[in-house]
Amino acid sequence: MLDTVRLYFSDTFGSADGVRVIMAPGRVNLIGEYTDFNDGFVLPMTVDRGVYLGIRPRVDQRVRIASSRFGELIDVSLGDFKRPEPGHWSCYVLGVVEELRLLGLISTGFEAVIDGNLNLGAGLSSSAALEIATAVALQTIFKFEMSRIDIAILCQRVEHRYAGVMCGIMDQFASGLGRKGHALLLDCRTLSHVSIPVALGDYRIVIISSEVKRELASSAYNERRSQCEDGVLVFKQKDPTVEALRDVSIEALEACGGELSEVVYRRCRHVITETARVLDASAALGAGNLTQFGALMTQSHLSLRDDFEVSCAELDCLVDIASGVEGVLGARMTGAGFGGCTVTLIHKDSIDTLREQLLTYTERFSLNPEMFVLDGNGEAGEVLAN
Ligand code: GLA
């Protein structure tokens, strides 16, 4: 990718002299869905694909950024541009630029190209990877002090302010702080985190893209978030120390059940049981108990499907197909849902069988799911020539 990015840079801006290339990986969440904005726990890991960004400072205020995927070039002035459409690729980049400028951390322009090998909109956090790549790239050339945690928080704010998605911290944190060979157990309340080695022996993590684009995902996402907040208000009346669903036990949920609407009750039940599953799954992974880890993944899917209602027929079908293959320990949707990807823990000798079984999916939905076996995973930072 390094050479491709440099070539694209010189094609776009005349030469590639002095270009630095930064990569930020996408992520797959192993377990812990919709727990981040409820102050709970998550267990994502980075993938081996990501956003690659070539960058070079300018002495004037011009900001020129090209996207290879979209064949577009934007040309604006630092601190003086029209806000891009929420969800357009440039909203993530310019959002980071503007937030850093407002903090006084950048005062001149730059030129950049964006490339990558991450499926866009496939639920592997391409937008978080783009935000993190932009922030780390600007830090590389302008050399300001900012911790990776603060970078992740800034990028989350960009998602809120520029893309209109009231997301939690998981994706930006995973892309910015995930380490090679490890999953990241993150406490989304305190942001304390532990890297857990992913030692799978003969097992592999397989990601399958449903090829369903998540059209209405941002409004449904924000709706889920406010349903969780509705739940918190009810629990808070009983116990003022409750700040988030993280603080609510399953017993407290059962005791309050009648006071919540049926939908809010199920949303809360998902978050409360999922938070417990993340801790159990992390312990199982740490202890090498992959059978238990896989069982928890599948339970997570059922809870997302039935209680949180963020799955869809296509994701359910992929999980059902995987669950029917011998050698599969667990499978679930990953990320926000409504499309995107599933993650499966599978014995390496069963991978071909799973691939063959995906024909059923193609027959049913006329979609060709992309399947890939996770082979190592990346870390955000500058890509240097060997
Ligand atoms: C999206 C958001 C995350 C998280 C997941 C669901 O990926 O960006 O913050 O809420 O959905 O777990």
Image: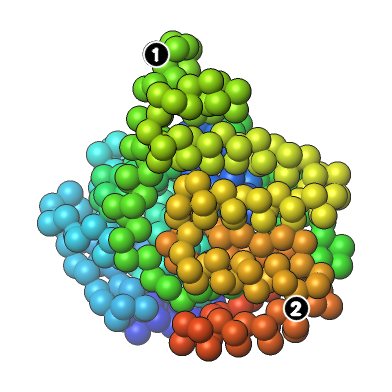
Describe the colour scheme in one phrase: rainbow
Is residue 181 found left or right of 2 in the rendered image?
right
The yes-or-no answer for disc 2 within 8 Å of ligand 1 is no
Which residue is at 40% across, 81% downward?
Answer: 8
Mark nearer the N terminus (2 vs 1): 1
Q: How much space separates mark 2 and mark 1, taking CA atoms?
A: 50 Å
Classify residue 54 by image quadrant: bottom left
Residue 358 visible in the snapshot: yes
Residue 287 rendering spot, x and y as whole percentages: 86, 44
Identify the amino acid type marked 2: Ile
Position of the C terminus by quadrant: bottom right
Residue 247 rendering spot, x and y as whole percentages: 54, 23
Q: Residues within 10 Å of mark 2 (few under 14, many from 20)?
A: many
Give the residue at mark 2.
Answer: 351
User: How many badges with numbers are in the image?
Assistant: 2
| For residue 322, above or below residue 301 | below
| For residue 253, above or below residue 99 | above
Q: Residues within 10 Å of mark 1 (few under 14, many from 20)?
A: few
Secondary structure at numbered mark 2: helix
Is residue 2 found left or right of 183 in the rendered image?
left
Give the residue at mark 1.
Answer: 237
